[in-house]
Amino acid sequence: MTAVRRFTLAIHGGAGTVARAALSGADAHGYRAGLGAALRAGHRVLAGGGCALDAVTEAVVALEDDPHFNAGLGAVLTEEGRVEMDAAIMDGRDRRAGAVACVSGPRNPILAARTVMERSPHVLLAGEGAERFLRAEGVAFAPATYFLTQRRIEALDRELRRRDSGKPDRRSDADRHGTVGAVACDAAGHLAAATSTGGLTGKQPGRIGDTPVFGAGTWADDATCAVSATGHGESFMRWVVAHEIAGRLRHRGECVEVAATAVVSALAENDGAGGVIAVDAAGHFALPFNSEGMYRGVIEPDGVPRVAIHDEPLT
Amino acid sequence: MTAVRRFTLAIHGGAGTVARAALSGADAHGYRAGLGAALRAGHRVLAGGGCALDAVTEAVVALEDDPHFNAGLGAVLTEEGRVEMDAAIMDGRDRRAGAVACVSGPRNPILAARTVMERSPHVLLAGEGAERFLRAEGVAFAPATYFLTQRRIEALDRELRRRDSGKPDRRSDADRHGTVGAVACDAAGHLAAATSTGGLTGKQPGRIGDTPVFGAGTWADDATCAVSATGHGESFMRWVVAHEIAGRLRHRGECVEVAATAVVSALAENDGAGGVIAVDAAGHFALPFNSEGMYRGVIEPDGVPRVAIHDEPLT
């Protein structure tokens, strides 16, 4: 009998949490249930000997399909009232990578990103050109109405009325920083990362954030770590957050917890509200954030999902 | 009398050089003249006490306006026969950054990127959403015919006929890896970087390469260095080339020449044909490439442009 090798899956549902005081018990239950379901979906892959790449794909599909989170079903709307979604996936074995930006049709943008990685010579495809490629590859599309959820229509309405009134932008993190992501270390010690988002409520069409930018919002390299970020995308791009964490492992020999915590702390001083999930090839993980909360969770071989929303420990 | 402080401007016109044996004397003269004019345009700014950001802007505008180079006038065509250009600019003083991707109208994409940096809250805008923003901001657009140069039409025609014939892709670097870029250290020790490209001849619409991805094709941070890359964009994105060079300065204490040369050498083993130009805050520069050549040049306070195409020294 051989010992079960350690594997780890960590996920986030965005640093855009509802403030602790404003989060009802029923809502908290909904978020926790969504995180738990995504962790179990990824666990099934890893416990069956599957690879990290498949595990992060399954976990992110589950989060995209849950309307609590700003990705896939539940994505926020642009100022023109439609979704424009970004997603990225990266395989730590060989740094293969694929991403989509500003796509409106794919039901699961993370599957679109994976199709770019596996079936195109490119790393990043955007807009209509991306959509044509994805349709030709047989990626599943959903009708526009699928993405128009009541909650996101109301959030856009509030934001457009605020702009008309000239009042300052006092949106909470919950209205601004939604993203979902997953990182995994499989039993063979391989890493993968996946991130998916609808972006910012009322955003300008064509805006691309950190999610589909490898090194900023998404990163995986077996030699260092896998990272998925959530937060103020523009700052995360200017600080190349995920690759900076990996660089501290490679060049300074730091562990993933020290590196991720240091980079996220420094971001707080640079208009970089948010957080990251990170895992290394030994299965060690870190989930630091500098915002009020970050929907997050971890699952290991015992199969028990552990999740948290604000600064409480994982349970 | 005070000593003139050192300043440095380095530029590239792409690693997609014409093979030495195939480059006529007249063509070589044209490339060298274009590089020289761009160096002098940037030198005027720096010699007048201007900042690195303005110097790289002026140098890249000059390269965009020269049809020898694959950016602005002279940009290559997508498989649909139109230009889709990417450009990025970054200010090392505060890491402010702006980029455009997949834009068709702006006469000088680098001015479009600078407008995103200075007049939007975003870092990267793509496609029609970007074009609407740029028109509203008064950025100069050119008609589609401005960009349809005979040379690029013929290159696309050759590539589309090759695809129809099913022959393997044996395009030279010159048909594939065109980009222009500039990095500068001004007399105050501030850095900036700018990169602009038409991408790949016959590319899929919506493809975004390394140019507008901060950390991959473009980077500037006074604390380390400014970098502009040219080459196989997908590899440069997966190796986060520019930020990796900066990381080696920050974390390992390497000088810019050692770091840039090491990263470009490693790229050669990872399908990463191309090169970079890099400068640090003391004005030290490096121009390594792993391809047959890289159109490149440097100018310092003496105002004498020094340029090279293949592996000959700068003259």
Image (cartoon, coloured by chain):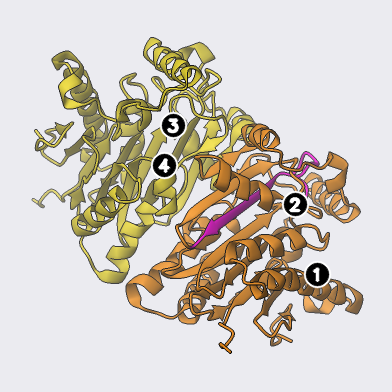
Chain colours: A yellow, B orange
Q: Where does label 1 land, which residue?
A: B34
x, y (%) of residue B263? 48, 72
Q: Assess whether mark 4 and mark 3 are in contact (beta carbons under 8 angstroms).
A: yes
Q: Real-space Cα distance between discs 1 and 2?
A: 21 Å
Q: Real-space Cα distance between discs 3 and 4?
A: 9 Å
Q: Where does label 4 land, which residue?
A: A233
Q: Is B175 placed above or below A267 here?
A: below
Q: Real-space Cα distance between discs 2 and 4?
A: 31 Å
x, y (%) of residue A165? 47, 17
State which region is magenta. Answer: B76-92
Type of amino acid under label 2: Thr
Type of amino acid under label 3: Gly
Q: Assess whether mark 2 and mark 1 are in contact (beta carbons under 8 angstroms).
A: no
Residues indicated by labels 2 and 4 sit on the same polypeptide chain: no
Magenta stretch: includes residue A134 = no
Type of amino acid under label 1: Gly
Q: Residues within 10 Å of mark 1 (few under 14, many from 20)?
A: many
Mark 4 chain? A
Type of amino acid under label 4: Gly
Q: Where does label 2 land, which residue?
A: B201
